[in-house]
Amino acid sequence: MPRYTAPVRDMQFLLHDVLTIENYDNLPGFSDASRDVVDQILETGAKFAEEVLFPLNKIGDEQGCVRNSDATVKTPDGFKEAYDQLVESEWLSLSADPQYGGQGLPNVVNVASNEMQSSANMAFSMYPGLTHGAYQALLAGGSEEQKQTYVTRMVNGGWSGTMNLTEPQCGTDLGLIKTKAVPQEDGSYKITGQKIWISGGEQDLTENIIHLVLARIEGAPEGIKGISLFVVPKYMVKEDGSLGDRNGMTCGGLEEKMGIHGNATCVMNYDGATGWLVGEENKGMRTMFVMMNEARLGVGLQGLAQSEIAYQNAADFARDRVQGRALSGPAAPEKPADPIIVHPDVRRMLMDSRAFNEGARAFLYWTALHGDLLHKSEDEKVKEKAGDYMALMTPVLKAFLTDRGFKSCNESLQLHGGIGYTKEMGVEQYVRDARIALIYEGTNGIQALDLVGRKLAADGGRAIFSFFREMDDFLGENESNEALSLYTKGLKDARDRLDEGTNWLMKNGLSNFDNAAAASTDYLNLFGLTAIAYMWAKMAKVALEKKAAGETDPYYDTKLKTATYYVERLLPETAAHLAKMQAGSESMMALEADAF
């Protein structure tokens, strides 16, 4: 049977020792995030994830969601009770703005909590995750009345939120949206159209669902420039905050999906539903991008989270399953065969996953900390750099972590052999659940195009050059540190390849856009591998310092061994990605379409 143990020790190492979040106690929220408070949050969050959410993961997968005859939706058994516990324990409000009922703690702490919940039950965690993104969008673009009406009740968990973008005829190309909005005399709009693949569009967890809907006002410009954003509640809200009549929308059906069965993925039909404009007319994408970027970071987290739980169960199986003998001689002569963990290729799969998981966690938390600095720091230079990093790293985190996370889940299944392909061990669910993360919130190919087509060139390349300077500063500061030299040399080699790839794009991508597009996925992988190499160098430095100070915790030795594996076995992939980039687009585009 599968199990999940939250990686609390690794989270503590990152938050306290690598990111040293206590050093930011002069900023709002950080002053309340003492080591003791953070550790209590992590330990309590681990217990909730392990004991409440994880036991429901298999139930949710087997039962799925059910659309009732009245178009309401029943979530799997136990989900409602677990959600009520989530609300009662105030997990939803952990990092939310105190002005609207939140606790105001740093979001980087909230990210750690979210990772545990997503590992334990990815489908369940999507309900509060999307609510968080929805109220962030309202905070960014909504009126004060909308914030007071909706955000306060979303923060406390009584109401949930969704994002309504996709329609049957358009996914990525949102300029093709047909849902229309007709203005009314009272300032509201009547929303009519159909949206598909709406996660949590209907459910029985909350008393109201607040839909953020993209639509086109009559007479608006064609394409993306004519899209507006509307807040459309499931139930109308009276002046005193109580709920009124059901709005003009229904769940027209549930999608039958490969995975995340416990999350209701709905077809939403809007038939003259009442909605209110969020922000300015025809500027809806600007506000929706706030939610989309929140969601993309959350999806990157899902890639890590599923990789972590798959790895844990693969490691358990490898220690227990006996098969064959170690080539160097019997490791367990008293047994009829050795545990398969003695075999190098089994170790390869486990170490690939472990090195990815710990590096990706550091990369995600490091980026989340910059998000906190963007919103909380009063230093304009710090805010500028943080904003640059959030924009630059978002497509990398979304795509790289989900690609590699899915690969890790796949290899965890492979390690189990034939029994991994059955439902008995549970690992096949992680493969199915993880697979969607490469697709939704913008496919990974789209993320790569966004990275090379928009994020690199923004503000004259300010973000990427800032990242190069930061790595160079780290390398310069540690140039004489012999104990760290393996990791700094690996980082230097990867950094130079990323620099070479960036320059190649600037030279060849502008003269032939196909070159940029053909190179985009390899560039994103090169970027992700390099960023995680930087994280591993930072973690190795701290581990070495701890050992030099007399710390005897074996955790630090394990960390250094994993760092060495990453540098020697995974980081060399940067050379291959650079070579593929520099091959250009000619061979990729050579075949006529009819030849495929």
Image (cartoon, grey):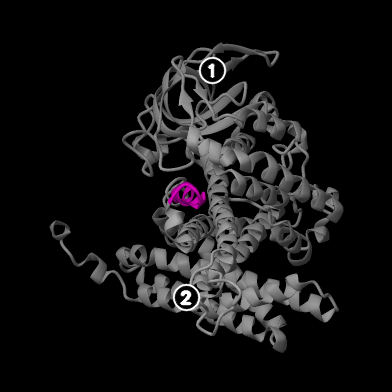
What amino acid is labelled 2 in the image?
Answer: Thr
- Tell me the residue at 42%/21% (across/down): 270
Q: Helix, strand, or loop for circle 1?
A: loop
Where is mark 1, residue-wise?
A: 187
- Is 369 included in the stretch rendered in magenta? no
Q: Within 10 Å of the Cα at label 2, are there few (<14), some (14-19), or many (20+) other Cα atoms?
A: many
Q: Quick check: 319 above or below 447?
A: below
Numbered range of the magenta stretch: 422-435
Q: Quick check: 235 above or below 228?
A: above
Name the quadrant of the C terminus. Answer: bottom left
- Is 426 included in the stretch rendered in magenta? yes
| Residue 253 badge | none
Circle nearer the N terminus (1, 2): 1
- Tell me the residue at 61%/74% (across/down): 334
Whether label 1 touches label 2, CB < 8 Å: no
Question: Residue 321 appears at what percent x and percent y?
Answer: 54, 64
Tag in front: 1 or 2: 2
Q: Is residue 279 visible?
A: no
Where is mark 2, residue-wise?
A: 574
Residue toward you, 183 or 97: 97
Q: Is 458 displayed left or right of 581 in the figure?
A: right
